[in-house]
Image (cartoon, rainbow, N blue to C red):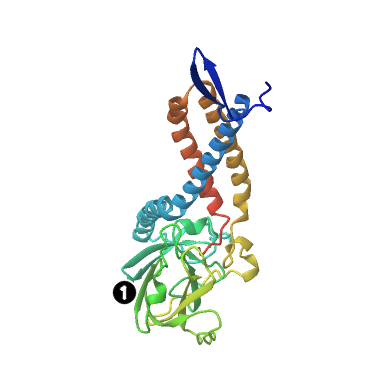
Protein backbone atom coordinates (compact mmCIF):
# COMPACT_ATOMS: atom_id res chain seq x y z
CA UNK A 1 0.00 0.00 0.00
CA UNK A 2 1.28 3.40 -0.85
CA UNK A 3 1.95 5.86 1.97
CA UNK A 4 -0.70 8.26 0.72
CA UNK A 5 -3.35 5.48 0.64
CA UNK A 6 -2.84 3.91 4.02
CA UNK A 7 -4.27 5.29 7.28
CA UNK A 8 -2.25 7.10 9.89
CA UNK A 9 -1.86 3.75 11.67
CA UNK A 10 -2.04 0.13 10.69
CA UNK A 11 -2.73 -3.05 12.66
CA UNK A 12 -0.40 -5.92 11.87
CA UNK A 13 -1.22 -9.37 13.15
CA UNK A 14 1.84 -11.49 13.81
CA UNK A 15 1.47 -14.90 15.42
CA UNK A 16 -1.78 -13.88 17.05
CA UNK A 17 -0.40 -10.62 18.42
CA UNK A 18 -1.78 -7.39 17.07
CA UNK A 19 0.82 -4.63 16.71
CA UNK A 20 -0.22 -1.08 15.89
CA UNK A 21 2.26 0.81 13.73
CA UNK A 22 1.99 4.62 13.76
CA UNK A 23 3.33 6.81 11.00
CA UNK A 24 5.86 9.40 12.18
CA UNK A 25 5.60 13.08 11.32
CA UNK A 26 6.71 14.29 7.97
CA UNK A 27 10.40 15.18 8.04
CA UNK A 28 11.62 18.48 6.65
CA UNK A 29 14.83 18.87 4.80
CA UNK A 30 17.54 20.78 6.68
CA UNK A 31 18.97 23.89 5.03
CA UNK A 32 21.94 23.23 2.88
CA UNK A 33 25.00 23.15 5.07
CA UNK A 34 26.80 25.21 2.47
CA UNK A 35 24.59 28.19 3.37
CA UNK A 36 25.74 28.28 7.00
CA UNK A 37 29.09 30.03 6.38
CA UNK A 38 27.21 32.84 4.63
CA UNK A 39 24.93 33.40 7.61
CA UNK A 40 27.93 33.23 9.92
CA UNK A 41 29.83 35.76 7.82
CA UNK A 42 26.92 38.22 7.82
CA UNK A 43 26.54 37.86 11.58
CA UNK A 44 30.21 38.50 12.18
CA UNK A 45 30.19 41.60 9.97
CA UNK A 46 27.20 43.01 11.86
CA UNK A 47 28.99 42.31 15.14
CA UNK A 48 32.03 44.24 13.90
CA UNK A 49 29.80 47.13 12.80
CA UNK A 50 28.22 47.21 16.24
CA UNK A 51 31.66 47.30 17.84
CA UNK A 52 32.62 50.26 15.64
CA UNK A 53 29.50 52.17 16.68
CA UNK A 54 30.34 51.42 20.30
CA UNK A 55 33.83 52.82 19.71
CA UNK A 56 32.27 55.98 18.29
CA UNK A 57 30.11 56.51 21.37
CA UNK A 58 33.04 55.75 23.67
CA UNK A 59 35.21 58.20 21.76
CA UNK A 60 32.77 61.06 22.24
CA UNK A 61 31.87 60.38 25.85
CA UNK A 62 34.85 58.67 27.49
CA UNK A 63 38.04 58.44 25.43
CA UNK A 64 37.54 61.99 24.15
CA UNK A 65 37.38 63.30 27.72
CA UNK A 66 40.71 61.64 28.50
CA UNK A 67 42.21 63.15 25.34
CA UNK A 68 40.89 66.56 26.34
CA UNK A 69 42.52 66.36 29.78
CA UNK A 70 45.82 65.23 28.27
CA UNK A 71 45.84 68.05 25.72
CA UNK A 72 44.92 70.57 28.41
CA UNK A 73 47.82 69.48 30.62
CA UNK A 74 50.25 69.89 27.73
CA UNK A 75 48.81 73.26 26.70
CA UNK A 76 48.92 74.57 30.27
CA UNK A 77 52.58 73.60 30.60
CA UNK A 78 53.45 75.23 27.28
CA UNK A 79 51.51 78.42 27.96
CA UNK A 80 52.87 78.82 31.48
CA UNK A 81 56.37 78.60 30.02
CA UNK A 82 55.50 81.25 27.43
CA UNK A 83 54.08 83.54 30.11
CA UNK A 84 57.21 83.17 32.19
CA UNK A 85 59.37 84.08 29.20
CA UNK A 86 57.08 86.83 27.86
CA UNK A 87 56.64 84.99 24.56
CA UNK A 88 52.89 84.32 24.71
CA UNK A 89 50.98 85.64 21.67
CA UNK A 90 49.14 88.94 22.14
CA UNK A 91 47.43 89.04 18.74
CA UNK A 92 45.72 86.67 16.30
CA UNK A 93 48.48 87.31 13.76
CA UNK A 94 52.15 86.46 13.86
CA UNK A 95 54.84 89.10 13.43
CA UNK A 96 54.95 88.42 9.68
CA UNK A 97 51.17 88.88 9.33
CA UNK A 98 50.09 85.24 9.14
CA UNK A 99 47.32 83.63 11.17
CA UNK A 100 48.44 81.95 14.36
CA UNK A 101 48.73 78.20 14.02
CA UNK A 102 45.52 76.43 14.99
CA UNK A 103 45.61 75.26 18.59
CA UNK A 104 48.26 77.75 19.74
CA UNK A 105 47.53 78.56 23.42
CA UNK A 106 46.46 82.20 23.78
CA UNK A 107 44.77 82.39 27.20
CA UNK A 108 43.80 80.65 30.42
CA UNK A 109 40.08 80.92 31.21
CA UNK A 110 38.94 80.56 34.83
CA UNK A 111 35.36 80.59 36.13
CA UNK A 112 35.38 80.17 39.93
CA UNK A 113 31.65 79.49 40.21
CA UNK A 114 31.97 76.45 37.92
CA UNK A 115 35.44 75.47 39.17
CA UNK A 116 36.52 75.65 35.57
CA UNK A 117 40.03 76.28 34.30
CA UNK A 118 40.72 75.78 30.61
CA UNK A 119 43.52 76.74 28.28
CA UNK A 120 42.08 78.55 25.26
CA UNK A 121 43.64 77.75 21.90
CA UNK A 122 43.56 79.75 18.70
CA UNK A 123 40.93 78.63 16.20
CA UNK A 124 37.48 77.12 16.54
CA UNK A 125 37.31 74.20 14.11
CA UNK A 126 35.69 70.97 15.26
CA UNK A 127 39.10 69.30 15.29
CA UNK A 128 40.78 72.01 17.39
CA UNK A 129 37.93 72.21 19.94
CA UNK A 130 38.61 68.58 20.87
CA UNK A 131 41.51 69.90 22.95
CA UNK A 132 39.58 72.68 24.68
CA UNK A 133 37.90 76.05 24.09
CA UNK A 134 38.99 78.10 21.11
CA UNK A 135 39.32 81.81 20.39
CA UNK A 136 37.41 83.09 17.35
CA UNK A 137 40.13 84.54 15.14
CA UNK A 138 38.35 87.68 13.94
CA UNK A 139 37.72 88.96 17.47
CA UNK A 140 40.22 90.64 19.83
CA UNK A 141 41.98 88.60 22.47
CA UNK A 142 40.52 88.79 25.99
CA UNK A 143 41.43 91.99 27.81
CA UNK A 144 41.51 94.05 24.63
CA UNK A 145 38.87 96.56 23.51
CA UNK A 146 35.87 95.12 21.71
CA UNK A 147 34.11 91.77 22.02
CA UNK A 148 36.32 88.73 22.42
CA UNK A 149 34.59 85.45 21.54
CA UNK A 150 35.51 82.00 22.89
CA UNK A 151 33.81 78.81 21.72
CA UNK A 152 33.67 75.53 23.65
CA UNK A 153 31.99 72.14 23.44
CA UNK A 154 28.91 71.32 25.47
CA UNK A 155 29.14 67.51 25.71
CA UNK A 156 31.83 65.76 23.68
CA UNK A 157 35.53 65.70 24.55
CA UNK A 158 35.08 66.67 28.17
CA UNK A 159 32.34 69.24 27.47
CA UNK A 160 34.22 72.16 29.08
CA UNK A 161 31.29 74.56 28.50
CA UNK A 162 28.57 72.14 29.59
CA UNK A 163 27.63 74.26 32.61
CA UNK A 164 28.06 77.85 31.45
CA UNK A 165 24.26 78.16 31.27
CA UNK A 166 24.35 78.10 35.10
CA UNK A 167 26.23 81.40 35.26
CA UNK A 168 24.37 84.32 36.79
CA UNK A 169 24.68 88.07 36.54
CA UNK A 170 27.69 89.25 38.53
CA UNK A 171 29.63 85.97 38.43
CA UNK A 172 33.36 86.48 37.95
CA UNK A 173 35.45 85.30 35.01
CA UNK A 174 39.24 85.66 34.98
CA UNK A 175 41.29 85.37 31.80
CA UNK A 176 45.08 85.39 31.69
CA UNK A 177 46.87 86.27 28.45
CA UNK A 178 50.31 87.43 27.43
CA UNK A 179 49.16 90.95 28.39
CA UNK A 180 48.25 90.09 31.97
CA UNK A 181 45.20 89.10 34.00
CA UNK A 182 41.80 90.38 32.91
CA UNK A 183 38.63 90.33 35.00
CA UNK A 184 35.06 90.14 33.76
CA UNK A 185 31.61 90.14 35.35
CA UNK A 186 28.81 88.13 33.76
CA UNK A 187 26.00 90.22 32.28
CA UNK A 188 23.67 87.36 31.43
CA UNK A 189 22.87 84.31 29.31
CA UNK A 190 21.39 84.60 25.81
CA UNK A 191 19.59 81.95 23.79
CA UNK A 192 18.14 81.90 20.30
CA UNK A 193 15.60 84.69 19.92
CA UNK A 194 16.96 86.83 22.76
CA UNK A 195 17.94 90.38 21.77
CA UNK A 196 21.61 91.06 21.16
CA UNK A 197 23.45 93.34 23.51
CA UNK A 198 24.69 96.67 22.19
CA UNK A 199 28.33 96.66 21.17
CA UNK A 200 30.67 97.78 23.95
CA UNK A 201 31.53 101.45 23.87
CA UNK A 202 34.83 102.88 22.78
CA UNK A 203 37.62 101.67 25.03
CA UNK A 204 35.42 98.99 26.64
CA UNK A 205 35.77 95.24 26.45
CA UNK A 206 33.46 92.24 26.54
CA UNK A 207 33.88 88.48 26.61
CA UNK A 208 31.30 86.20 25.00
CA UNK A 209 31.37 82.46 25.66
CA UNK A 210 29.48 80.34 23.13
CA UNK A 211 28.43 76.70 23.20
CA UNK A 212 25.59 74.49 21.98
CA UNK A 213 22.13 74.76 23.48
CA UNK A 214 19.75 71.86 24.04
CA UNK A 215 20.24 68.26 25.23
CA UNK A 216 23.71 66.73 25.27
CA UNK A 217 24.74 65.48 21.81
CA UNK A 218 21.46 66.82 20.36
CA UNK A 219 22.07 70.57 19.98
CA UNK A 220 19.17 72.74 18.90
CA UNK A 221 20.90 76.12 18.70
CA UNK A 222 23.67 78.11 20.37
CA UNK A 223 23.91 79.61 23.84
CA UNK A 224 25.90 82.74 24.69
CA UNK A 225 27.18 84.15 27.96
CA UNK A 226 28.21 87.81 27.93
CA UNK A 227 30.59 89.35 30.45
CA UNK A 228 31.89 92.92 30.65
CA UNK A 229 35.52 93.75 31.22
CA UNK A 230 36.07 95.39 34.61
CA UNK A 231 39.86 95.53 34.58
CA UNK A 232 41.95 97.92 32.52
CA UNK A 233 41.73 97.56 28.75
CA UNK A 234 45.02 96.58 27.11
CA UNK A 235 46.35 97.44 23.68
CA UNK A 236 44.69 95.83 20.67
CA UNK A 237 46.72 94.72 17.67
CA UNK A 238 46.69 92.32 14.74
CA UNK A 239 42.97 92.36 13.94
CA UNK A 240 41.78 89.65 11.54
CA UNK A 241 38.92 90.43 9.11
CA UNK A 242 35.88 88.16 9.21
CA UNK A 243 36.45 86.86 5.68
CA UNK A 244 39.84 85.50 6.76
CA UNK A 245 38.22 83.06 9.18
CA UNK A 246 38.12 79.57 7.60
CA UNK A 247 34.65 78.21 6.91
CA UNK A 248 35.18 75.23 9.21
CA UNK A 249 35.75 77.56 12.19
CA UNK A 250 32.29 79.11 12.15
CA UNK A 251 29.48 78.23 14.57
CA UNK A 252 28.03 74.71 14.47
CA UNK A 253 30.19 73.65 11.51
CA UNK A 254 32.09 70.39 11.12
CA UNK A 255 35.66 70.11 9.89
CA UNK A 256 35.51 68.98 6.27
CA UNK A 257 39.26 68.38 6.23
CA UNK A 258 38.59 65.22 8.26
CA UNK A 259 36.70 63.60 5.38
CA UNK A 260 39.78 62.15 3.66
CA UNK A 261 41.18 60.58 6.87
CA UNK A 262 37.73 59.15 7.59
CA UNK A 263 37.61 57.44 4.19
CA UNK A 264 41.15 56.09 4.59
CA UNK A 265 40.51 54.70 8.06
CA UNK A 266 37.17 53.24 6.95
CA UNK A 267 38.98 51.31 4.22
CA UNK A 268 41.59 50.13 6.72
CA UNK A 269 38.78 48.99 9.02
CA UNK A 270 37.10 47.08 6.18
CA UNK A 271 40.34 45.26 5.33
CA UNK A 272 40.97 44.49 9.01
CA UNK A 273 37.43 43.17 9.43
CA UNK A 274 37.77 40.85 6.43
CA UNK A 275 41.11 39.61 7.77
CA UNK A 276 39.62 38.84 11.18
CA UNK A 277 36.69 36.98 9.63
CA UNK A 278 39.12 34.99 7.48
CA UNK A 279 41.13 34.01 10.56
CA UNK A 280 37.90 32.98 12.28
CA UNK A 281 36.89 30.78 9.37
CA UNK A 282 40.27 29.24 8.61
CA UNK A 283 42.10 29.11 11.93
CA UNK A 284 39.71 29.34 14.83
CA UNK A 285 37.58 31.46 17.09
CA UNK A 286 40.15 32.19 19.78
CA UNK A 287 42.81 33.18 17.28
CA UNK A 288 40.34 35.64 15.77
CA UNK A 289 39.61 37.10 19.22
CA UNK A 290 43.27 37.50 20.10
CA UNK A 291 44.03 39.24 16.81
CA UNK A 292 40.74 41.03 16.25
CA UNK A 293 40.09 42.76 19.57
CA UNK A 294 43.25 44.92 19.67
CA UNK A 295 43.33 45.42 15.89
CA UNK A 296 39.70 46.37 15.38
CA UNK A 297 39.63 48.31 18.65
CA UNK A 298 42.56 50.50 17.65
CA UNK A 299 41.31 51.09 14.12
CA UNK A 300 37.74 51.66 15.33
CA UNK A 301 38.73 54.27 17.91
CA UNK A 302 40.94 56.08 15.40
CA UNK A 303 38.14 56.10 12.83
CA UNK A 304 35.69 57.38 15.45
CA UNK A 305 38.08 60.19 16.42
CA UNK A 306 38.39 61.29 12.80
CA UNK A 307 34.65 61.01 12.19
CA UNK A 308 33.90 63.11 15.28
CA UNK A 309 35.64 66.05 13.60
CA UNK A 310 32.88 66.03 10.97
CA UNK A 311 30.29 66.80 13.66
CA UNK A 312 29.40 70.38 14.69
CA UNK A 313 32.22 72.06 16.57
CA UNK A 314 30.06 72.98 19.60
CA UNK A 315 28.70 69.45 20.16
In this view, 161 is above or below 144: above
Front residue (pair 204, 87) = 204
Residue 90: x and y, percent? 46, 66
Front residue (pair 19, 166) = 19
Q: How packed is label 1: few (under 14 Cα within 10 Å), some, or many (20 or more)? A: few
Query: Residue at the spot x=48%, y=64% of the render?
Result: 134
According to the picture, the residue beneath numbered tag 1 turns out to be 113
Query: Residue at the spot x=62%, y=29% of the render?
Result: 7
Residue 137: x and y, percent? 55, 66
Front residue (pair 227, 194) = 194
Q: Is residue 181 in view?
A: no
In this view, 150 is above or below 273: below
| Among the 4 quarters of the image, the one containing residue 12 | top right
Residue 33: x and y, percent? 60, 25
Q: Is residue 7 in view?
A: yes
In this view, 128 is above or below 144: above
**SS of the residue at dot 1?**
helix
Front residue (pair 248, 244) = 248
Amino acid sequence: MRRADRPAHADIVTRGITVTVLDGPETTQCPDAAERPLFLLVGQMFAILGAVLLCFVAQLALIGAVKHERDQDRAFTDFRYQLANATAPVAALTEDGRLLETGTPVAILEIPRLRLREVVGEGTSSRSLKSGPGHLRNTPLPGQAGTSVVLGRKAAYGGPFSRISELRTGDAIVVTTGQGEHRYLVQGVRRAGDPERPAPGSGAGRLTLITADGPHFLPTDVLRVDARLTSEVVATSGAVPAFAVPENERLMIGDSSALVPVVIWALILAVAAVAVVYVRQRVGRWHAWVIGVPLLGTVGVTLADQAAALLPNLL
